Image (spheres, rainbow, N blue to C red):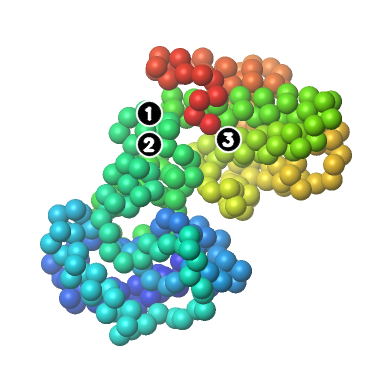
């Protein structure tokens, strides 16, 4: 059973009854669930990932006003619940870099922790300069219960509210980066005999192209070690994950990898055309990056460097 399912089961069995019984006046305003850092929040945990910093529990999300009034008592009640009705024990060591998000927090603190802002972005700059992986962490996991609906409302606003101009700018930046690294610098590095630099160029191409795939699915690319796993679940172009992985893990057949780079570019361009974002011809990702930028209405965003936002 996945960690998120164990968390939900523990909330339903122990957390929900305690909250309804001991905090009835708060029940209709709080939210509970699990989201944020950790493979279990993405549903990617397994026996290997559970060897460190793995716990079962849930997080209670409050408004700032309710946290000031109930936070201390609710925190003590949560710790008492873990002692009186302990969740399933799974052997897992604590690491120096590990951190848990279980317990009591405010909705504002949750988003500040992951996005650096107290909720959904309020302007195009916050949309453009907040890293994609941060948005992915703010949206992952599951909400087990949301009395007021506020926590879910903010998450939905993040999931669906990116302005079109920002999406176009980020896509343009990713495509320009992919063109520069994979279609231009990779073969040039090989001609210079710089094999290490050629591998780094492919790494840049994979990151840029991979993140572009998420945007084309109206989603956000996550932390690099889960990028391929999340990519394979994308409904559009998710099957390119294997080709992108080959660029990093396949043999040193540079001709084959150059061909794969162009194949990936062809499919990305085809998807851009399917979504009616571009209309030009050719296979040069840089050309389509500039076509995307030309479609941006906001003059401040359109004036930024083509690679800004990647």
Q: Earlier in the sequence, mark 3 or mark 2?
A: 2
Q: Whole-Å distance between the Cαs marked 1 and 3?
A: 19 Å
Please identify the residue farthest to the bottom as the structure is shown.
84
Find numbered disc 1 in the image and state the secondary structure of the residue it sits on. Answer: helix
Q: Nearer the viewer, mark 3 or mark 2?
A: 3
Residue toward you, 50 or 190: 190
Residue at 78% x, 28% y: name it: 189
Find numbered disc 2 in the image and state the secondary structure of the residue it sits on. Answer: loop
Q: Earlier in the sequence, mark 1 or mark 3?
A: 1
Q: Cβ–Cβ below 8 Å for labels 2 and 1? A: no
**Which residue in the structure is indicated by mark 1?**
125
Residue 214 seen from this side: yes
Q: Cβ–Cβ below 8 Å for labels 1 and 3? A: no
- Relative to 240, does residue 288 appear above or below in the rendering? above
Image quadrant of residue 190?
top right
Please state if 65 lies on the left or on the right of 195 as rendered: left
Q: Cβ–Cβ below 8 Å for labels 3 and 2? A: no
Q: Which mark is residue 93?
A: none
Find numbered disc 3 in the image and state the secondary structure of the residue it sits on. Answer: helix
Q: Which mark is residue 161?
A: 2
> Residue 208 location in percent, x, y?
61, 35
User: Mark 3 packing: few (<14 Cα in 10 Å), some, or many (20+)?
Assistant: many
> Residue 212 location in percent, x, y?
58, 35
Please state if 174 lies on the left or on the right of 189 as rendered: left
Image quadrant of residue 301?
top left
Residue at 40% x, 64% y: name it: 100
Q: Nearer the viewer, mark 1 or mark 3?
A: 1
**Which residue in the structure is indicated by mark 3?**
212
Image quadrant of residue 277?
top right
- Relative to 232, does residue 203 appear above or below in the rendering? above
Residue 202 seen from this side: no
């Amino acid at each position: 059973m996945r960690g998120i399912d164990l968390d939900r089961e523990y909330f339903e069995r122990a957390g929900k009854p305690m909250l309804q019984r001991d905090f009835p006046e708060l029940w209709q305003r709080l939210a509970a669930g699990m989201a944020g850092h950790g493979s279990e929040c993405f549903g990617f945990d397994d026996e290997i990932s559970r060897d460190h910093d793995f716990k079962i529990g849930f997080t209670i999300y409050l408004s700032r006003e309710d946290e000031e009034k109930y936070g201390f008592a609710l925190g003590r009640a949560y710790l008492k619940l873990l002692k009186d009705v302990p969740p399933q024990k799974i052997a897992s060591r604590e690491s120096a870099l590990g951190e848990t998000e279980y317990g009591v927090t405010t909705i504002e603190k949750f988003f500040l922790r992951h996005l650096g802002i107290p909720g959904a972005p309020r302007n195009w700059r916050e949309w453009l300069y907040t890293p994609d992986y941060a948005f992915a962490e703010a949206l992952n996991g599951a909400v087990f219960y949301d009395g007021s609906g506020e926590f879910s409302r903010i998450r939905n606003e993040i999931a669906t509210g990116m302005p079109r101009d920002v999406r176009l700018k980020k896509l343009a930046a990713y495509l320009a980066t992919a063109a520069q690294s994979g279609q231009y610098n990779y073969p040039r590095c090989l001609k210079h005999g710089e094999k290490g630099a050629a591998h780094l160029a492919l790494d840049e191409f994979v990151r840029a192209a991979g993140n572009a795939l998420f945007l084309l699915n109206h989603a956000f690319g996550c932390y690099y070690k889960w990028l391929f796993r999340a990519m394979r679940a994308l409904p559009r172009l998710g099957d390119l994950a294997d080709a992108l992985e080959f660029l990093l893990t396949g043999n040193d057949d540079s001709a084959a990898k150059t061909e794969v780079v162009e194949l990936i570019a062809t499919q990305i361009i085809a998807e851009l055309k399917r979504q009616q974002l571009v209309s030009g011809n050719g296979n040069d990702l840089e050309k389509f990056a500039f076509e995307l930028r030309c479609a941006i209405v906001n003059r401040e965003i359109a004036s930024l460097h083509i690679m800004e936002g990647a």
